Image (spheres, rainbow, N blue to C red):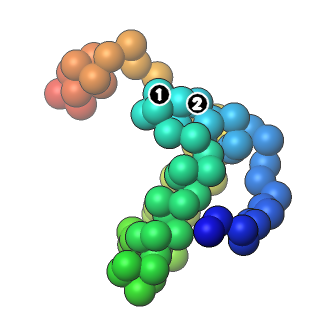
Amino acid sequence: MKTAIVHARIEPRTKRKAESVLRKLGITPTEAIRLYYNQISLRGGIPFPVEIPNKLTASTLNKSRRGKDVEEFDSVDEMFASWEK
Protein backbone atom coordinates (compact mmCIF):
# COMPACT_ATOMS: atom_id res chain seq x y z
CA MET A 1 0.00 0.00 0.00
CA LYS A 2 1.44 3.39 -1.04
CA THR A 3 0.62 5.83 1.76
CA ALA A 4 3.88 7.63 2.60
CA ILE A 5 4.30 11.14 1.20
CA VAL A 6 7.53 12.92 0.29
CA HIS A 7 7.60 16.74 0.07
CA ALA A 8 10.56 18.61 -1.41
CA ARG A 9 11.27 22.21 -2.34
CA ILE A 10 13.07 22.58 -5.67
CA GLU A 11 14.08 25.60 -7.73
CA PRO A 12 11.33 26.18 -10.33
CA ARG A 13 13.86 26.20 -13.21
CA THR A 14 15.38 22.89 -12.10
CA LYS A 15 11.90 21.38 -11.75
CA ARG A 16 10.87 22.50 -15.26
CA LYS A 17 14.06 21.16 -16.84
CA ALA A 18 13.84 17.83 -15.02
CA GLU A 19 10.16 17.36 -15.83
CA SER A 20 10.86 18.12 -19.48
CA VAL A 21 13.39 15.27 -19.55
CA LEU A 22 11.02 12.96 -17.67
CA ARG A 23 8.23 13.67 -20.21
CA LYS A 24 10.59 12.66 -23.03
CA LEU A 25 11.30 9.43 -21.13
CA GLY A 26 7.59 8.81 -20.52
CA ILE A 27 8.07 8.89 -16.74
CA THR A 28 6.08 10.97 -14.26
CA PRO A 29 7.86 12.84 -11.48
CA THR A 30 6.28 10.45 -8.97
CA GLU A 31 7.59 7.42 -10.89
CA ALA A 32 11.06 9.00 -11.05
CA ILE A 33 11.10 9.60 -7.29
CA ARG A 34 9.86 6.04 -6.66
CA LEU A 35 12.57 4.67 -8.97
CA TYR A 36 15.24 6.75 -7.21
CA TYR A 37 14.13 5.60 -3.75
CA ASN A 38 14.01 1.97 -4.90
CA GLN A 39 17.57 2.22 -6.24
CA ILE A 40 18.77 3.77 -2.96
CA SER A 41 17.13 0.91 -1.08
CA LEU A 42 18.53 -1.79 -3.38
CA ARG A 43 22.07 -0.39 -3.50
CA GLY A 44 22.29 0.78 0.08
CA GLY A 45 23.26 4.29 -1.05
CA ILE A 46 22.86 6.92 -3.71
CA PRO A 47 22.92 5.12 -7.11
CA PHE A 48 25.56 7.38 -8.66
CA PRO A 49 28.83 8.89 -7.50
CA VAL A 50 28.54 12.09 -5.48
CA GLU A 51 31.84 13.89 -5.24
CA ILE A 52 33.13 17.31 -4.29
CA PRO A 53 34.52 18.86 -7.48
CA ASN A 54 38.20 19.79 -7.61
CA LYS A 55 39.17 23.47 -7.96
CA LEU A 56 39.27 23.43 -11.77
CA THR A 57 35.87 21.73 -12.06
CA ALA A 58 34.32 24.05 -9.45
CA SER A 59 35.70 27.10 -11.27
CA THR A 60 34.42 25.83 -14.63
CA LEU A 61 30.95 25.13 -13.20
CA ASN A 62 30.79 28.59 -11.61
CA LYS A 63 31.81 30.26 -14.89
CA SER A 64 29.24 28.30 -16.89
CA ARG A 65 26.47 29.22 -14.43
CA ARG A 66 27.36 32.87 -15.05
CA GLY A 67 27.46 32.31 -18.81
CA LYS A 68 31.21 32.99 -19.06
CA ASP A 69 33.48 31.00 -21.39
CA VAL A 70 30.47 29.05 -22.69
CA GLU A 71 30.33 27.83 -26.29
CA GLU A 72 27.17 26.60 -27.98
CA PHE A 73 26.99 24.29 -30.97
CA ASP A 74 24.24 23.19 -33.33
CA SER A 75 25.46 19.60 -33.32
CA VAL A 76 27.88 17.21 -31.66
CA ASP A 77 29.86 17.04 -34.91
CA GLU A 78 30.29 20.81 -34.86
CA MET A 79 31.52 20.62 -31.26
CA PHE A 80 34.05 17.88 -32.07
CA ALA A 81 35.26 19.84 -35.09
CA SER A 82 35.95 22.85 -32.85
CA TRP A 83 38.35 20.70 -30.78
CA GLU A 84 40.50 20.03 -33.83
CA LYS A 85 41.23 23.72 -34.40
- Give the number of the disc on residue 12: none
Which quadrant is home to the N terminus?
A: bottom right
Badge 2 amino acid: Ser
- 31 relative position to 46: left or right: right
Q: Position of residue 69 (x, y in %)?
A: 54, 36
Q: Which residue is mark 1?
A: 24
Whether residue 42 is situated above or below residue 29 in the rendered picture = below
Quick one: which residue is furthest to the top in this view? 74
Residue 63 visible to an observer of this rendering: no
Quick one: quadrant of the C terminus?
top left
**Disc 1/disc 2 C-alpha distance (Å):** 7 Å
Reading the image, the residue beneath label 2 is 20
- Of all residues, the one furthest to the bottom in this rendering is 44
> Tag 2: Cα neighbours inside 10 Å, few (<14), some, or many (≥20)?
few
Q: Is residue 37 above or below residue 32?
A: below
Residue 6 vs residue 77, the one in the foreground:
6
Q: Secondary structure at mark 2?
A: helix
Residue drawn at x 79%, y 41% is: 12
Q: Is residue 70 above or below residue 56?
A: above
Residue 80, position as x, y percentages in the image: 22, 27
**Side of 24 where 84 appears, left or right:** left
Residue 65 image position (x, y, % from top left): 65, 44
Q: Dots 1 and 2: beta carbons under 8 Å?
A: yes
| Residue plotted at (62% across, 46% down) | 29
